[in-house]
Image (cartoon, rainbow, N blue to C red):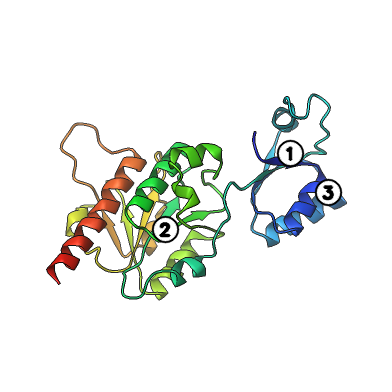
Amino acid sequence: MDNIIFGLRPVIEAIEAGRQIEKIYMKKGAEGVLLGELREIARAQHVHIQEVPVEKLDRLTKNGRWGQSANHQGVVAQISAIVYADIDEILAAVPEGVPGLVVVFDGVTDVRNFGAIARSAECAGAHGLIVPIKNAAPVNADALKASAGALNIIPVSRVGSIRNTLKLLQAEGFQVVAATEKAPKALYAADFTRPTAIVMGSEDDGISKEVLKLCNEQVSIPLRGRIESLNVGAAAAVMLFEVVRQRVATATAI
């Protein structure tokens, strides 16, 4: 794996130095003073720790770069491929007089889907992406490739709680719109000329019930074929460019 560091002290020092960590892989059942310190630091910096078998750590560190003798000490960290933005920075950067547009991810774990949505969002003029710390696709080299470089342009904010973030967006005047095939209302009937946060869920389970309860609207994409749903990447593109269509039409009419 590219962009990784390993060993207790190097990982702790990297976090304390301000390097942005995508995820920490820790040996399952590992204990010790330094491991406890690492857990505390990771929690304070909102870095997700995933406990894994030692064999996975061995695979991550055994390659041509380090050979067969790398001593990971039960800890491997993946460095973020991008610099994450604070959500307040994303909102502050929305130009005056322009309705904000952000995409919120709830359980999208496939790297290629994540990258494809990032590409569509950037092309549609979205102001940012919001991803949870847990249960989210890693922003790595594969995601960057799938996004065609969009992840180097569009700001991405990583948050501890999607629900709290949606409440914050609503307090800032955003409507939160869930994309779900179960909704009776078609997306074409929604008003996307307002500041909008579009929520996209996982391929398997969709948007969680807790998040759906917070959404102002739930809309679906009308389908005419026999397959029941679109890939989440394709669905996001349809949603985003309906926003573009409505906003272009409104601007033209003024």
Relative horizontal placement of residue 63, taking residue 251 as reference (left or right)? right
Determine which quarter of the picture holds residue 64: top right
Q: Are marks 3 and 2 in contact (CB under 8 Å)?
A: no
**Residue closest to the far left:** 253
Determine which quarter of the picture holds residue 20: bottom right
Q: Earlier in the sequence, mark 3 or mark 1?
A: 3
Relative horizontal placement of residue 184, taking residue 77 as reference (left or right)? left
Residues 12 and 50: in front is: 12
Q: Are marks 3 and 1 in contact (CB under 8 Å)?
A: no
How far, Cα to Cα, is label 2 from label 1? 30 Å
Q: Which residue is mark 3?
A: 9
How far, Cα to Cα, is label 3 from label 1? 18 Å
Relative vertical location of residue 253 with respect to residue 240 in this rendering, above or below: below
Amino acid residing under circle 1? Lys
Q: Which residue is mark 1?
A: 28
Q: Earlier in the sequence, mark 2 or mark 1?
A: 1
Label 1's element?
loop
Position of the C terminus, as image quadrant, is: bottom left
Relative vertical location of residue 165 with respect to residue 222 in this rendering, above or below: below
**Residue closest to the far right:** 33
On the image, the x and y values in percent for residue 130 come to 47, 57
Kindly identify the residue that appears in the image at 16 percent across and 62 percent down: 249
Q: Residues within 10 Å of mark 1 (few under 14, many from 20)?
A: few
Position of the N terminus, as image quadrant, is: top right
Amino acid residing under circle 3? Arg
On the image, the x and y values in percent for residue 224 come to 15, 37
Relative horizontal placement of residue 68, taking residue 167 as reference (left or right)? right
Relative vertical location of residue 214 with respect to residue 120 in this rendering, above or below: below
Q: Which residue is mark 2?
A: 211
Label 3's element?
helix
